[in-house]
Image: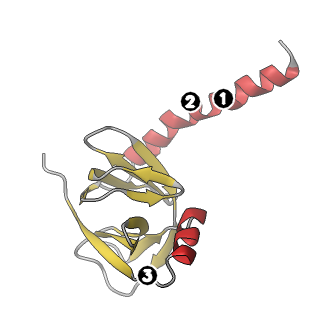
Amino acid sequence: MSRLSTLASFLLSIPLLAGPLSLVAAAQAPKGVIADVPFEFSVNNQRLAAGPYLVLLNSSGFLLLRNISTGKSQFLMMFPESTNTIQSQGRLIFHRYGSSHYLSQVWIPGTTEYRRCVQSRSERQTILAAKSASQAKVEVALKSPTK
């Protein structure tokens, strides 16, 4: 096997090795919350379907969004921000430009911190294209999962 194909095999195996480790980290996170997102949205240059999502935040700042209906998961690197007030209600905050929604912030209940997404290239292009169009913030409440 050539060095190039060996390197390619190794690089392709990294997600397979990291995946189970990431799930362990997410499992050790504080209790997850549920968000029922009624529209398709984008985050980190990925389009996600409308539906119920399990939201888990781990100690290293990664956020797991798992579509409960489809089982598809998205790990997000987000930036921590804080406020002076403990949040009693969690929420997802989206920026809306026309019919496009982009996840902007994740507020976890019972904490003074929230997580902020970096604007993707797609969102920046949408902003430029829709300068004359209205921008709005849309909030989706989080709730504890039922057992």
- The amino acid pointed to by label 2 is Leu
Residue position for label 3: 133
Compared with 75, 119 (above or below) is: below
CA gap, disc 2 and disc 1: 8 Å
The structure's colour scheme is secondary structure
Residue 55: which quarter of the image? bottom left
Circles 3 and 2, Cβ within 8 Å, touching? The answer is no
Q: Few, some or many C-alpha atoms within 10 Å of disc 2 (few <14, some 14-19, many ≥20)? A: few
Q: Nearer the viewer, residue 62 or 38?
A: 38
Q: Which secondary structure, mark 2?
A: helix
- The amino acid pointed to by label 3 is Ala
Q: Residue at x 50, y 60 (%)?
A: 61
Q: Residue at x 29, y 54 (%)?
A: 32
Residue 63: which quarter of the image? bottom left
Residue position for label 1: 12
First in residue order: circle 3 vs circle 2: 2
Farthest residue to the left: give it: 147
Residue position for label 2: 16
Q: Residue at x 36, y 80 (%)?
A: 136
